[in-house]
Amino acid sequence: MTSTDPSTRVSTPERREVLISGASIAGPALAYWLHRSGCAVTVVEKAGALRGGGYPIDIRGTAVEVVRRMGVLPQLRDAHIDLRRFTFLDADGATVASVDARAAGSPEGQDLEVRRGDLATILHTLVRDDVEFLFNDSIDTLDQSARGVDVTFRSGRQRTFDVVIGADGMHSATRNSLFGPEEQFHRYLGYCFAIFTMPNTFGLSQEIMMWNTPGRAAALYAVGDDELHAFLNFHRPQPPLAALRNPDAQRDLVASVFADAGWEVPALVDAMHTADDLFFDTAGQIRMPHWSRGRVALVGDAAYAPSFLTGQGSSLALAGAYTLAHALAAHRDHTAAFAAYEHGVRAFVAMNQALVDKGTATLFPITAEALEQRDTMLRGLVTMPSATERPAHSALKLPEFAPVP
């Protein structure tokens, strides 16, 4: 639905008008559940269109139940990336260990790994006929009052909503305008990373190859036969703030860090220089004492980004969106709804953010001793450890929505 005239929207005192900023994962998932509970939903997205592609992401534990209740589990199973092998390499490119990756999911095969763009597309398709999407626009100002939130958009349009939800990612503009600069909530985890796609000239298929030296990692992630997701990760005691704002500085920094690297790393660095989808950032978390202020709340990475080191970003976004929508459906008063949302999901968030010190984080040792310990552990493995051994993934029990009328 692409309406821009507020006079075409039918509003009653019982129908809550909700604006969601962000159309990636948390935003469309929240829009689905809010529409189902009777809200009139508008999603604003600064990009000109839905962003496809993107690196693979995981849907685990409680989040699998969320997508099952949304009715999209079969589609996501069809989109599941069936990785077969995870190979670890040393500084010279020799094999340290080659491990069966297919055991990384649950014994029942419930956990999913899909391209981020596939999940975003499936969620958007689910809600696009019922929800208003405003692409190529964003929130400029928010003015809260007793009657609602007066929103002025970058485009100049003005609208009033009952509540506004920021689902606009780790570097949320909604959070920045409401709570202040990101630095006060950002927990830097000591790593920087660059992700991009490149041609599959290595003949890889349904597998990951990862090269490591202390404090550095380079990986090729083959989800098909034609295209590779390349990943360059490195330790930095302090975040390179200047590079975060300058794509040329990002490329220069990565190139300098990997200048003497072996294996195929020089080819990855060359591909990075010409990639048109380079994504560079620091590994970090967002930790906030509260996720709402007045009539505005945050969900997903905007409120509690766990970092890619946990593998739980998308799962927290899906579970958080469900819980927030349920709270708004159960409480007409937004203050009570936001309090119920935080009470319902905060412990779950904390458990999953704590995973940063386990599991995936050990893939990137920063000392020679830690790297040797990791490699010794890997040599004894036949399959990757099961992600479902971590109870945090399924620690949240979802409340039930009322049946659809």
Image (cartoon, rainbow, N blue to C red):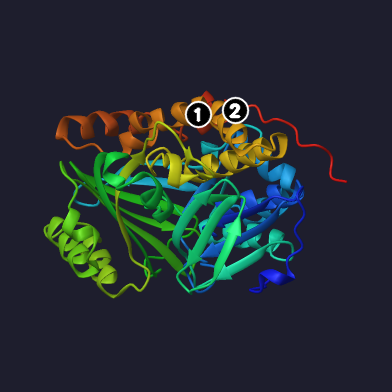
Task: For the N terminus, give its image quadrant.
Answer: bottom right
Q: Circle 1 sits on which residue?
A: 346
| Residue 81 makes an appearance in the image | no
**Horizontal side, residue 5 vs residue 27: left or right:** right
Q: Position of residue 334 (x, y in %)?
A: 61, 39
In front of the other: 200 or 396: 396
Q: Amino acid at mark 1?
A: Arg
Q: Residue at x 47, y 38 (%)?
A: 291
Residue 357 seen = yes
Q: Which residue is under mark 2?
A: 396
The correct choice, above or below, for 372 with respect to 3 in the image is: above
Image spot of residue 177 (x, y percent): 38, 52
Q: What residue do we see at 53% from left, 48% from top?
A: 145
Q: Residue at x 60, y 52 (%)?
A: 80
> Whole-percent x and y of residue 63?
61, 39
- Seen from the viewer's position, the closer of residues 145 and 396 is 145
Task: Tell me the kind of residue under disc 2.
Answer: Leu
State which quadrant residue 266 falls in. Answer: bottom left
Q: Nearer the viewer, residue 14 or 245?
A: 14
Q: Secondary structure at mark 2?
A: loop
Badge nearest the viewer, 2 or 1? 1
First reached walking from the N terminus: tag 2 or tag 1? 1
Q: Residues within 10 Å of mark 1 (few under 14, many from 20)?
A: some
